[in-house]
Structure formats: structure tokens, C-alpha cells
Amino acid sequence: MSLGMLRLFKIFIYLSLFITLLNAQKINESDNHLKDFDFIKKGFESDNTLLVIGGIQGDEPGGFMAASLLATHYEIKKGSVWVIPNLNFYSIIKRSRGPYGDMNRKFAYIETHDPDYKSITRIKNYITDENVKLILNLHDGSGYYRKEHVDWLHSPDRWGQSSIIDQKNLDIKKYGNLEEISSEVCEYINSYLIREKDFYTIKNTETRLGDKEMEKSLTYFAINNGKAAFANEASKSLLLHERVYYHLLALEKYMQIMDIKYERKFDLEPLSIKDVIDNDIYISFYDNKIQLPLSEVRSILNYFPIKKDGSLQFNVSNPLMTVVKEEEHYVIHYGNREIARLSPDYMDIIEKEDSINLEVDGENKTVQFGSIVNVNDNFMITSMENIRVNVIGFVKKGAKDEAGIKIEKSDILQRYSIDKSGNIFRIEFYKNDKFTGMILINFDKEFDYENLSKIMNNSTKKELSL
Ligand SMILES: [Zn+2]
């Protein structure tokens, strides 16, 4: 490299460093909750704990979606599983391998001022915890790993569809036969392939023999601390739900090997997995005063009630979900996806439990704020003293308060629905112009949200303070 080139290169490095810092600054101000990962303990305390990690690199959704499904849609009946579904949450939301550099190269050495320092220190504590006996790191890798070169996409340089070990054996009491375990896992996955070419192979990186890159990785750190560690790779050439399918097969085999008993809340089939990922997602605000199903949600929800000071307290049904303030919008993110933008209507919000009386298809009902009420033909909110009812999108204007009016689906403008198919509508309640709560009216007979409150009570609480 000539001196001129070197200077140019240096300027380029400084410039990209500066841009990275700028971006970091932008997020640091409002989004402390993005800098930390979730740690979810499942099952029962045991010195035979499985530690599962997803999201070390934000552009590998198969791995972190599988880990999050383990957290939300599996019940551990015997044994102990610890799940970290979003180790590098900031990189997941940014859809980038590593906004601060590759986190999986920071395990041998990390500077104390590195933005990933806190996360690395924290994850190392879990890895070295005396109860943890096996560690599984979930990745999406390029192409298809093959022992012999076949073509550009199928070769020894590729990572997809492989079970990674750093060495054959490790001299520890349990699970030190890394290669045997890895081979059992491959065999198990290979008996449930979607298509033949997806088959799994062991990839031994032989890290100890001088793989300078892999020496800096999470699994090698674990190995050097006397822990059995594996990485499972699904191919980036596959669809998301197919990658998740293969990760879950691997995961279940590791649990079987460790005699951990589990119950899954869906069928282990690619399309059922797609359904759970896309449709079983919810968010609630202000202690469940507002609950939103997100499976069909519109990309923008206008005039959404947000506290005057701009702060937002919310619960998410999935740890990969969060809200980020981006310019004038509050943006709901879910893994690599942007789900919806809330355009805020800043107002006073009264924190008060309340129930609503209404007539649904001629029957009287009492529901809590945040409920989603199924309606066939019509509904009518019962009038309450000092409470103003606003059916968002109701066309027969004139009445200031829309309680006491029998309303059908055709009385509400479809474009005001919260869902793309035009079936779910907002009803808001105000006391002296202060927001007190919301319910949703659902005209879609195919969806039943009765268990929503139960889901949201088990959800993760987060907060966006400004
Ligand atoms: Zn990876």
C-alpha cells in the first residue's frame, strides 16, 4: 500500500469510526433497553443446565427466533434451561452483524471501553456458572458446509447446515465427547429433513491447532473454561421458518441428550413455526390498559395515546420485541422486522383500573380496559358519568359521546381499523379529556383473543424513558 493510499485508508477508518459513534450516540440517548440482553430461566434449578444463546450477530434471525420460541413456546417439565434470545439486541434491531464489530470475536480479549464490554462480561458469568454443563450457540451461516468442494455455495468454506465443534473431545465429567454428541445431533436432524440437500454435517474447526479467528469466539471461551459447547448453523439460503425448524430440531436433540423434558405449544413443522412467528405476537401499554395483537397490524397507527412527557411503559409477548423512538414515531420492532409505527397523540393518561359495560349482539357484558371483544353484528357501549367514549372511525358524527349508540361494522370506516384486513377497531375512553383506557372490537370470526390477558401477564416489561 502506498503512503497516499495508507492515508486515505486511515481517513476512511476514522470516518467510519466517527459514523459508528454518531449512530451509537443517537441510540444511547433514548434506548437503554437495547443495550442489555434478556436472560430467561426455565424449568427447575439443576446442576445439569443447558444454556442456549441466540442473537450474537443481529443478521442471523433463524438462531434468535428459535431461541425466543424456546423462551415463549416451550414448557420445561424436567431439568433446567437458560435462554438468552437476544445477546446482541442492538445489532438485531439494527439488522447488522455487529454495529460495534463482531461480538463473537471479543471473547478472548475486549477493551473496557468497548460498547459490548458489559454484555460480554455478563454472558461470560453465565457461561462459567457451575450449573451450566452444555452451551449451544445458534447461528445462521452462509451456504451449505460440505467436507469436499462441490461449488461456490457448497464447500468447506461455508457454514450453513452444520454442527460446529472446536475439537473432538474435552476432558470434563459430562458431555466431553463433543464429536459424538454433535454426530448424534446431525443424525437426528437428518432424519427430519425438509429436502435432502439440507442435510447436516459436523464441522470441526480444530480451533486449538491455530484457528486465530475461532480462538476469539464464545464457544472456544466456553471450552477453555471446561464447558461442553456447540454451535448450530442453519443455512442463510433457507427461509426463516425453515432455519428455525432446523435449530429447534437440534435444540430438542440436545435436550434429549441431557434428559431435559419439554412440552412444545405448536407442531414442529415448518408452516406451524411460520404461523407462530408471524401471528402469535402482542404488545400492551400502560399496565395492559391498551393491548394490541400485532399479526395483521397496520404499518402506521395514528393518534396513538402517549403520555405527555413522552415516556412509554409497555409489555411485549416476545423478548425480541421492543419500541424505539425514531424521530416523531414510536416504532415497534420485532427481531429484524419493523412491525408498526405509532404516531403519538400526547396527552394526560389516568392510571386507574376500570371496567366497561357494553352490549354485544344484544347481550350484556363487562370487560376490563385492554380487552378485545368479539362482535358478530353490533355493539353498544353503556354510558358512564363523566366518561366520553370515542369509537375511532365512527361515521355518524354529531354526538360528542358515542356511548349509548348501537354500532355495526358498516358504521365504522375501514381505514381506521388497527389491522390490515379491517376487522379490529379502537374504542377510547376519556375523563375530562384525559385518556383512561382502550378496548378493541373484533369483527374477525377467525381470531379469538380470549387468552390475550394471560399471554400479556407472562410477558416481558420494558420501559422507554426520555
Ligand atoms: Zn453467526
Image (cartoon, rainbow, N blue to C red):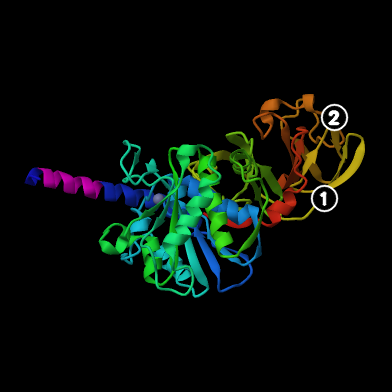
Q: Amino acid at mark 2?
A: Asp
Horizontal relation, residue 412 to residue 231: left or right: right
Give the camera-side residue of 396 and 226.
Answer: 226
User: Mark 1 = which residue?
Assistant: 355
State left or right for residue 208 relative to residue 95.
left
Give the x, y percent position of residue 176: 44, 68
Q: Residue at x 41, y 45 (%)?
A: 160
Front-most of 347 and 241? Answer: 241
| Segment colored magenta | 5-15
| Residue 80 in view (yes/no) | yes
- Secondary structure at numbered mark 1: strand
The x and y percentages for residue 459 are 65, 55
Q: How many marks?
A: 2
Q: Nearer the viewer, mark 1 or mark 2?
A: 2
Residue at 58% in and 60% down: 256
Residue at point 88%, 44% (across, down): 365
- Distance between the Cα atoms at labels 1 and 2? 22 Å
Residue type at tag 1: Ser
Q: Is residue 9 magenta?
A: yes
Q: Residue at x 78, y 46 (%)?
A: 450
As for residue 422 lying within the magenta part, the answer is: no
Q: Secondary structure at mark 2?
A: loop
> Is residue 370 toward the left or the right of residue 244 in the image?
right
Q: Earlier in the sequence, mark 1 or mark 2?
A: 1
Which residue in the protein does label 2 denote?
A: 377
Q: Is residue 286 above or below residue 408?
A: below
